[in-house]
Structures are given as structure tokens and as C-alpha cells.
Image (spheres, grey):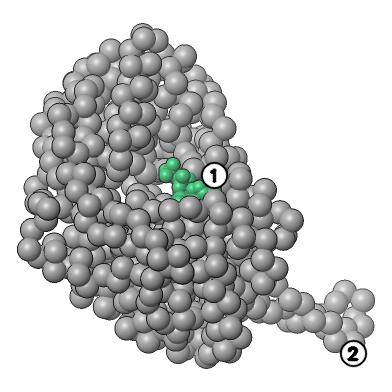
Amino acid sequence: MTLEMHEQDLLHKVQAGIGIGGTWGPSSSGATFTVEDPATGDVIKSVADATVEDAVRALDSAVAAQQEWAETPSRLRSDILRRAFDLLIERKEEFALLIAVEMGKPISEARGEVVYGGEFLRWFSEEAVRVQGDYRRNPEGTGSITVSHLPVGPCYFITPWNFPLAMATRKIAPALAAGCTAVIKPAELTPLTTIYLVQLLEEAGLPPGVVNVVPTSNPGAQSSVLLADPRLRKLSFTGSTAVGVKLLEAAAPNVLRTSMELGGNAPFLVFDDADLDRAVEGVLLAKFRNIGQACTAANRILVHDSIADEFVGRVSEQVAAMKIGRGADEGNDIGALVDRRAVAKTVALVADAVETGAEIVTGGDTVAGPGNFFQPTVIDKVGPDARLVNEEIFGPVLAIIRFASEDEAVQIANDTEYGLVSYVYTENLGRSQRMIEKLQTGMMGLNTGLVSNAAAPFGGIKHSGIGREGGFEGIREFLSTKYTLTPR
Ligand code: ADP
């Protein structure tokens, strides 16, 4: 065990169990699964491995709490969310360390995730008291129409490992604000942050049963039973498109409301009229945040021929200087990838890019163990046949594709089944407007490499998903519309 003392103390505070109805306990089978530090491969904690029966008990608990929670005055629900925000910010260092230890990202970025994730609690504490309806007269003049928005009911959340805190608050906060209860299944690689968050919500005054947490090493078995349960009314999932499609199929017979945040293949366009200082800074953020493991990560960097040499030179110089090391230790830029599979995929995509004509400018290799490290890498002149043109790299590899004209750039950018986010660097107003209209993505960063914000509607089009998280839109995903007709 290479954990430092303060890390061990923190891990002791995190429940190792399943949280149902305000009580923490073991799995009904007694089974556990282990969580590892991806930088060392060491086991950091064992966690109860929820059975399907445990998950059904968690749903029983969410269903039992639903009516009372929906009838709880929105001011009280808002106050609990606000208290949770305050507590989270007070414990920023603890949460950041937990995220960095179990997930591997640099501690400075983990602090950023706590602030970002916390903002959903604050934003939806503010939205909870602002759910509006409306009143209309029908055009015939024979009656009035009253429109109200009511909580959709018990929800099931499946979250990924790359932002273990923020992806949980982004679902839990709007659900609670809307008056919904939930069962949450964190990713098996990173359950600790979610468990600790649910502990914090309880401390903030959340009544038992409103949020229940069921970590499992067998998500397929759990999801198929919960999604078929007629008492469940909503699925919200963040993860890969492949799993998302399976879940949509499983949700269909039960006609569930769904919010799906799926994969991305973000293009990052740098035009010849771009401010290169800003573009270099932006691409490093859009690419290397989370060691490249984000659905919003810039996957294809499209750079105009006339500036490509200078851009590649400046970017590569900075990438080559990045410091690789354990995320939980201060001062590292590039932490370990989440597991061995992630390293193997990165290795394969880089090898394939080189075979199809690309050149490695810096990096390009794994780092000797322990831990799942891959060097921060820049590859230039990536060809159209490279696999990474169509697949999310999810690793620290900045792949440059050169283009000659605006039309060509747009064509390449849109030539993907995904449509989550695009990034555009240009100082030309007309071109900016054209890009807003032409790029087929749900979000765009215009001269910025970071779009995530709790006050904005996050989400994609095409195979990147359905629905929006955050913003005014976020709470609507948890409300169903009811209209009442009253004759005059
Ligand atoms: P990744 O490949 O990046 O790990 P996944 O889509 O596999 O992304 O994982 C995202 C979340 O989906 C995790 O919580 C994981 O446990 C969960 N998951 C994976 N397979 C299933 C499934 N068949 N049913 C429900 N959840 C699943």
C-alpha cells in the first residue's frame, strides 16, 4: 500500500457499502469488488457489490420516498441542495483527493471538477423554486387550459468514471429540484466519490430513500431488471454510445423517459485568421483535460495548411514539457489512464494512425509501470483512413489533420456519426456565424476550449445523445407536462 496517511484517513470515511433508505450495508450476497489507484495498480478499497435484489430494494426505497419528496415544498428542497453545495465546497480538498486517487486525474483538475460539479447543486437549488406553468384560453373561447409541470417519478442514474462527481451532481441535482427520487449506479472503476457524495447529501438533510446508491460489478444484470420495472419512470445515462444504445433498447418496452449523454468525436478547427496564442492554449485544455478522457475532448484537430507548421511546433513544445505522474500527487499535468484497456486502445489508435500516414511529433509511447500511463502525444498529418478519425481516442493524443479550405474543414468536421461539441478558432465574425450554423453539434466553443457550465444546456445531437443537462433545460428532463381543461 503506497497510500499516504491522509489518503488512508479519507478512504476510511467513505462508506464501503450500498446506501438504501439512509442505511449503509453489505451486499445481500456478501460479495465485494475492489477499487484501484490507476497510477499504482494498488487496491485502495473494497466496496459492496450490489446484487439485483439489492437494486430492487433500492428502487423500492426510491418509490416509497417519491410522493413525500414531490410534496416537500420546493423551498425546502432548494435549501437542502444549497446546503449540499456549501458542504461540498467546504470539503473541496477531500473530494478532489478522492477523485484523483480513484480516477487518476491531476489533483488541480480534480479541484476543478469539485467546483464544476458543485455548481449543479447551486444552480438547481436556484431552479427548484422557479418551475413555472401557464394559463391559456382555448381559441374557441369555450374553456381555459392550465399547464403544469410535475415530477416524472423515480429515476435510475448510470454514471461514468471520468467525472465521478460532476456526472452524479449533474443528474441528482435537477432530479431533486424537480421532486424526483433516484437510484444511482456509479461506474465500477470509481464508486467512492459517488458514495461520499450521497453521504454528504444525507448530512445536508436529504430524507432517507430519496437517493439510493448501488455500486455493482455487473451493471448489465442490474440495469435490465430496473429498466423493466414499471415503477421506474426515467433513465439518465452518461457513457459510451454502444452501452447507451443497449440501454435505450432495454428502456423502450417500459416507455421510459430517457436522457442520454453519449460519445463524442469533437472537431477543433483552427482557421488561418485565428489568434494562435489563444488557439494553442485552447487546444491544450480541450485535449489534455482529464488526460484526454472526456466526451468533450478535442478528438480531431483541424488546422489550416498555412498555419499548421507554426501551430504544431508551438503545441508540441508545450506538450513535450508536460509532467507525467500520479494525479493525486501535486504538480503533475498528465495522470494515469483509468485502466489497462484504455492504454491498449491508445496504443492501437496511435499505431494505426502511423500506419495510415501520420507522423509522431512528440510522445507516442507508454510509460513503464506501475500504473496506466501514456505519454502526452502530438501526431501530425493524420490521414482520412486513420481509425481515430472515427473513434474517440480517450487518451492524451493530440491528432492534427490539415485542411485547405473552409468548406473542406466543415465537411471533415461533420463527417462523423457523433455531434456533441465542436471548437472553432477564428477572429472573423462572418466565419464564426457560418460555423455556428454549419457545424452539426449540440455545443460549440467559439475561441474557447472549454464549454462545460452548470448554467448551460450540455448535450449532443446525432449519436451523441438525447436531452440536455444543466441550464434551464436540465430540470425539464425531470418534469412531465400536464394540461387541464376547464370549460367556461
Ligand atoms: P466506458 O467504456 O468509458 O467505461 P461505459 O459506457 O462502458 O463507458 O460505462 C459507463 C457506465 O455504464 C458505467 O457506469 C458502466 O458500469 C455502465 N455500464 C456498462 N455496461 C452497462 C450495461 N450493460 N448496463 C448498464 N450499465 C452499464
| Label 1 – label 2 distance at C-alpha | 50 Å
Front residue (pair 4, 438)? 4
Q: Amino acid at mark 2?
A: Arg
Most extreme residue toward the front is 29
Residue drawn at x 46%, y 29% as measured from the top left? 391
Residue highlighted by disc 2:
488
- Residue 342, percent from left and from top: 34, 35
Quadrant occupied by the C terminus? bottom right
Placement of 211 over or under 116, stated as above or below:
below
Report whether the residue tagged 1 is closer than 8 Å to ligand 1: yes
Please give the residue where the numbered disc 1 appears in the rendered image. Answer: 243
Q: Nearer the viewer, residue 447 or 126?
A: 126
| Residue in front for this viewpoint, 115 or 276 | 115
In the rendered image, is residue 215 in sight? no
Q: Quadrant of residue 354?
A: top left
- Under mark 1, the amino acid is Val
Q: Residue at x 21, y 44 (%)?
A: 41
In the drawing, does residue 156 fall left or right of residue 75?
right
Mark 1 or mark 2, which is nearer to you? 1
- Residue at (33, 62) in percent of width and height: 47
